[in-house]
Amino acid sequence: MAPEAVRISEIPVHGPLFEGAMAVYGEAFARPPYSDLDRGAEIRLRLRDTHARRTGFRLLAATEHPERVVGMAYGYHGEPGQWWHDTVLKRVTPEVAADWFGDSYELVELAVHPDFQCRGIGTALVEDLLRGRPERTCVLSTRTDSEAHRLYSRLGFEHIIEMTFTAGGWPFYVMGKRMTADR
Ligand SMILES: CC(C)(COP(=O)(O)OP(=O)(O)OC[C@H]1O[C@@H](n2cnc3c(N)ncnc32)[C@H](O)[C@@H]1OP(=O)(O)O)[C@@H](O)C(=O)NCCC(=O)NCCS
């Protein structure tokens, strides 16, 4: 559950709430360990032109007072032909590929404004995004030097593989959570 004053809702990929979500994303990744000042601008195009068109896409915003965006998360159904999906599948065995990525929801981005972190908002965004999803698993990647993997472990995500996505790039943990017990 999100903290009392925070509301989580699905938002469109345009308009003031979308702009608020993009600003929060930029702020969150501008801080260490990322210190990435360009990331806020990069995500906008990728999200609108590519990710928003994918099956199961949902963008959530956490808002306070009632229109200030303080957190965001989005995901979609993972499929062959998607860069992240294909890159990870090249690195795992066929058994792991079928088990974890055969019917998966991808948690693509998660960010909470630095002034609002450690209040349960990130947890609530992940839980809301995954609630009712029909996929067997949820998968994601997070930099090994990020604190976020502790949050994901607490939410039931397991380490699948550690890998880099680009030559000489940062190492990431690819993590997965089983979403239904009976499949
Ligand atoms: C990761 C992030 C979304 C967590 O949001 P949040 O609202 O602080 O999350 P919660 O309050 O629900 O949970 C806090 C947990 O996050 C972890 N955490 C993540 N970043 C942290 C930070 N900068 N400082 C302290 N703890 C942090 C803690 O381990 C904590 O786990 P715990 O409750 O088991 O101790 C937020 O810290 C953030 O936006 N970080 C920068 C962007 C990022 O790393 N995104 C994820 C990339 S995969």
Image: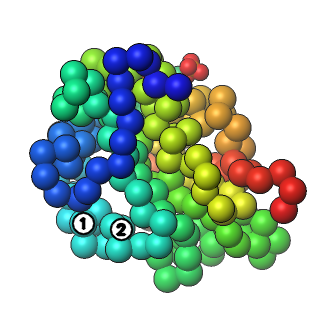
Q: Callout 1 environment at 10 Å: few (<14), some (14 to 19), or many (20+)?
A: few
Q: Residue at x 76, y 72 (%)?
A: 98
Name the residue beneath numbered marker 1: 48
Q: Quadrant of residue 86?
A: bottom right
The residue drawn where x is 65% and y is 34% is: 155
Q: Of helix, strand and loop, which one carries label 1?
A: helix
Q: Residue at x 59, y 29 (%)?
A: 150
Q: Is residue 2 left or right of residue 61?
A: right
Q: Amino acid at mark 2?
A: His
Question: Does 91 sit above or below residue 153?
Answer: below
Q: Is mark 2 within 8 Å of ligand 1?
A: no
Residue lying at 55% horizontally and 76% vertically, measured from the top left: 79
Residue 36: x and y in percent read 25, 42
> Residue 170, position in %: x, y?
45, 49
Return the residue nearer the eye: 62 or 164: 62
Q: Quadrant of the C terminus?
A: bottom right
Q: Is residue 78 above or below residue 160?
A: below
Badge 2 vs badge 1, beta-carbon distance below 8 Å: yes
User: Is 170 displayed left or right of 97 in the figure?
Assistant: left
Q: Amino acid at mark 1?
A: Arg
Q: Nearer the viewer, residue 129 or 150?
A: 129
Q: Position of residue 78 (x, y in %)?
A: 55, 69
Q: Residue furthest right?
A: 182
Q: Residues under labels 2 and 1: Cα distance? A: 6 Å
Q: Tag 2, which secondary structure?
A: helix
- Res 91 visible: no
Query: Which residue is under mark 2?
Result: 51
Of residues 154 and 148, the one drawn nearer to the viewer in this rendering? 154
Residue in the foreground of this view, choosing between 91 and 113: 113
**Label 2 crowding class (10 Å Cα cut-off): few <14, some 14-19, many 20+?**
many
Percent across and percent down for residue 135 are 66, 63
